[in-house]
């Protein structure tokens, strides 16, 4: 590495996640330290990559660090995303309020500003935009800033090309009780934007606080002749006249989104004829009609992406609430009407639909370029649909059949034939309600990953991570550690003490100080096939498929980085060992048993030791409700945090009554690796624990310096 040219190292650094670049590469040597500050690496900054604590002291430290970082890269920064990181108003304002200071920051190249999910205030937005009028892309989704305020400030950006706004999900009490007030002001401010921002190419305005009627839509069609994407919340006052202006030959809109339409009756027959260049269409509403599907096929023959979204917001008794309509959805005949003309479809999302096998077979035969399909809760589909897709859709990359009745054993045909597959979601519903079984849980330690707010959940593909937004900090042994151990051990039951003594006896006989534990013996590696599926993400929650079918799937997918088998009936040692040996790139593994899964097989220490031995890239692991894990396996995991599992950041497990592991195992062997936040939470749990209850622990570990 020392002999590599700077250009190659910079190219490698550009691929690193932001935390690794700052806390990893920058701390390796002086050369890497200086290279990590190269301005070519800092054209884009996404602060959501960092974790921050809600502790007041840590928050101030992080805010100061962000401010210093922005100061150092102000000349090169082109794109800035704040996300959920909490910073002071001066940072949100890009230091615009410090105009009297000689060292005032000047973000002369800043073009993209994303405040989505942040705590930015209207004043912060006003100062930032007025001091940086060259902004071209502005995003404000789910903030506390109102629609009218955003429209009023956007007019100060004459070069604006992208404007994205989504209402906050938590509606303020004033608008709930006065839903019709202010709509006229909102309309006037919205009509000003097209006149002052004629270069707009992407417009997403999703709000039910302001009716975007014919006059507003016409203004965008008249002044914004460069529009490529138009997406907005449907208004009851919209008519056919609103879209006639888009017949102008200068308009080339390729993406259209019509969301949250609550009216009944077809309407696409008078909307789509005005958009002859459509490639992407998103429809959100309560109903799908045959006339609408005929219109899609007739007027959008070059359509590549079609998304039907059933959920939305509606007003009920003065309150806004989410609805999920499963009636009168897309049926097989309607899908065939679309596919008959739209043969270039690459992406099709039709969840909660009444489509059948015949329509999916017809889809796979007509649309040979399919890459992404989502048929969540389409209960009429069987394995025949999978066979048709695996036979004809050779370009398939993503497939989602969540909550269907298809047995997981039929997935083997997909991974065997569709070599381009990257993501497969076939989660089943649990057999019994887990909430009833977990009612006796005394306490738990939860923490949320801030990134889980964006991926939307993304069709149930979020990884099981309970990380609190806390900074990675180095911890050394202190008197507080011993005090915490004393508190933990004091609350142990008699059975826990026996388990602890057995564990210490085992360690004395098997562990040599300063060396790896003796039980980490070499396993015989599986040979990865030269021709295999490049699947990256696989989710089989609550699977009842036999173990052999799952073994065949994992041996064919060595590139997996995310696996979720929560509640699976085949969580055996052989299956976990196969996963560990076959998937060396694995980062996230969810293998929690069901809370009522007492009589079903579950892996034990053998499977856990295989993960410790082979999964060098593992970052998140969850094995809740597993009664077969003993102090042997858990101690091996903690000892490996400075070795094979150096990348591990979070584990989720159960300890206490009914489980072989006790809090003493965590206290004696894992305490030094825990973050301060997890230590405090663990102490609180131990002080309230009782001998007849068990606890759910979601523990975060300190970031450790990589040796690879």
Image: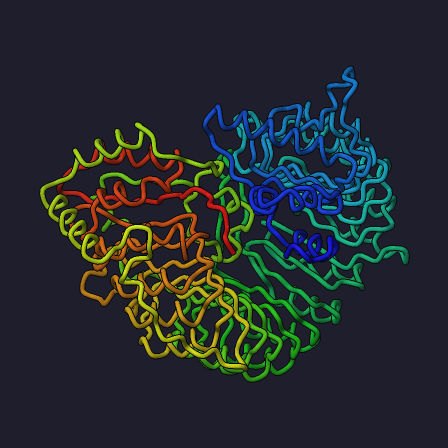
Inspect this view and state whether residue 140 appears.
yes
**Residue 647, image x, y percentages:** 46, 52
Q: Which image quadrant: the N terminus?
A: bottom right
Identify which residue, 31 or 473, lies in the foreground: 31
Inspect this view and state whether residue 385 appears.
no
The structure residue drawn at horizontal position 79% and vertical position 27%, both measured from the top left corner, is 130
**Residue 644, image x, y percentages:** 41, 57
Q: How is the image coloured?
A: rainbow
In the rendered structure, the answer to whether residue 404 lies left or right of residue 507 reads: right
**Residue 463, image x, y percentages:** 45, 54
The structure residue drawn at horizontal position 34% and vertical position 65%, both measured from the top left corner, is 610
Identify which residue, 576 or 168, lies in the foreground: 576
Instruction: Establish if 447 lies above or below 380.
Output: above
Q: Residue furthest right?
A: 249
Instruction: Establish if 589 lies above or below 113.
Output: below
**Residue 380, image x, y percentages:** 44, 73
Q: Quadrant of residue 691?
A: top left
Q: Quadrant of residue 488?
A: top left
Identify which residue, 317 or 396, lies in the foreground: 396
Identify which residue, 335 or 199, lies in the foreground: 199
Instruction: Establish if 663 lies above or below 192.
Output: below
């Amino acid at each position: 590495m020392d002999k590599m040219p700077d250009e190659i190292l910079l190219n490698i650094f550009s691929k690193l996640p932001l935390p690794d670049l700052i806390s990893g590469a920058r701390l390796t040597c002086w050369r890497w330290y200086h290279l990590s500050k190269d301005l070519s690496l800092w054209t884009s900054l996404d602060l959501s990559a960092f974790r921050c604590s809600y502790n007041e002291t840590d928050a101030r430290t992080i805010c100061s660090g962000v401010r210093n970082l922005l100061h150092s890269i102000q000349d090169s920064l082109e794109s800035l995303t704040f996300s959920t990181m909490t910073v002071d108003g001066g940072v949100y304002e890009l230091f615009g309020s410090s105009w009297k200071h000689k060292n005032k920051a000047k973000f002369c190249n800043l073009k993209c500003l994303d405040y989505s999910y942040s705590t930015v205030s209207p004043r912060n937005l006003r100062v930032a935009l007025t001091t940086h009028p060259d902004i071209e892309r502005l995003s404000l989704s789910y903030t506390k800033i109102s629609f009218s305020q955003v429209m009023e400030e956007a007019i100060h950006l004459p070069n604006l090309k992208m404007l994205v706004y989504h209402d906050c999900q938590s509606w303020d009490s004033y608008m709930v009780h006065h839903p019709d007030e202010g709509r006229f002001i909102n309309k006037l401010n919205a009509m000003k934007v097209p006149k002052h921002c004629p270069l707009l190419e992407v417009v997403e305005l999703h709000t039910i606080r302001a009716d975007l009627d014919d006059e507003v839509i016409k203004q965008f069609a008249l002044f914004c002749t460069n529009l490529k994407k138009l997406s907005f919340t449907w208004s009851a006052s919209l008519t056919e006249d609103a879209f006639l202006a888009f017949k102008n030959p200068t308009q080339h809109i390729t993406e259209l989104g019509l969301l949250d339409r609550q009216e009944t009756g077809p309407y696409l027959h008078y909307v789509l004829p005005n958009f002859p260049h459509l490639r992407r269409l998103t429809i959100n509403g309560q109903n799908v009609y045959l006339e609408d599907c005929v219109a899609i096929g007739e007027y959008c023959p070059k359509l590549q992406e079609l998304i039907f979204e059933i959920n939305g917001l509606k007003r009920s008794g003065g309150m806004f609430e989410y609805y999920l309509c499963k009636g009168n959805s897309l049926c097989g005949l309607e899908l065939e009407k679309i596919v008959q003309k739209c043969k270039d479809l690459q992406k099709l999302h039709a969840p909660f639909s009444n489509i059948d096998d015949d329509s999916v077979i017809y889809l796979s035969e007509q649309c040979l370029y399919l890459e992404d399909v989502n048929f969540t809760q389409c209960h009429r589909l069987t394995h025949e649909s999978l066979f048709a897709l695996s036979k004809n859709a050779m370009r398939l990359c993503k497939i989602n059949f969540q909550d269907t009745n298809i047995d997981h054993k039929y997935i083997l045909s997909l991974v065997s034939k569709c070599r381009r597959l990257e993501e497969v979601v076939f989660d089943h519903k649990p057999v019994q309600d887990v909430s009833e079984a977990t009612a006796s849980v005394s306490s738990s330690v939860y923490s949320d990953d801030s990134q889980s707010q964006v991926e939307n959940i993304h069709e149930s593909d979020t990884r099981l991570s309970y990380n609190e937004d806390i900074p990675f900090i180095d911890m050394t042994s202190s008197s507080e550690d011993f005090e915490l151990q004393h508190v933990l051990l004091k609350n142990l039951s008699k059975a826990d003490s026996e388990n602890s003594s057995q564990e210490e006896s085992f360690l004395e006989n098997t562990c040599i100080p300063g060396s790896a534990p003796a039980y980490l013996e070499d396993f015989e590696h599986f040979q990865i096939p030269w021709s295999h599926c490049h699947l990256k993400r696989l989710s089989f929650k609550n699977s009842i498929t036999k173990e052999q079918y799952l073994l065949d799937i994992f041996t064919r997918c060595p590139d997996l980085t995310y696996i979720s088998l929560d509640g699976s009936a085949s969580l055996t040692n052989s299956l976990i060992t196969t996963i560990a040996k076959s998937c060396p790139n694995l980062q996230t593994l969810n293998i929690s048993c069901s809370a009522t899964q007492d009589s079903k097989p579950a892996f034990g220490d053998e499977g856990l030791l295989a993960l410790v031995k082979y999964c060098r890239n593992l970052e998140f692991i969850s094995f809740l409700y597993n009664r077969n894990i003993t102090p042997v396996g858990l101690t091996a995991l903690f000892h490996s945090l400075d070795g094979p599992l150096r990348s591990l950041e979070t584990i989720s497990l159960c300890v206490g009554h009914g489980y072989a592991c006790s809090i003493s195992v965590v206290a004696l062997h894992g305490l030094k690796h825990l973050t301060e936040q997890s230590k405090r939470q663990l102490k609180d749990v131990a002080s309230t624990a009782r001998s007849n209850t068990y606890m759910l622990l979601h523990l975060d570990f300190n970031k450790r310096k990589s040796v690879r």
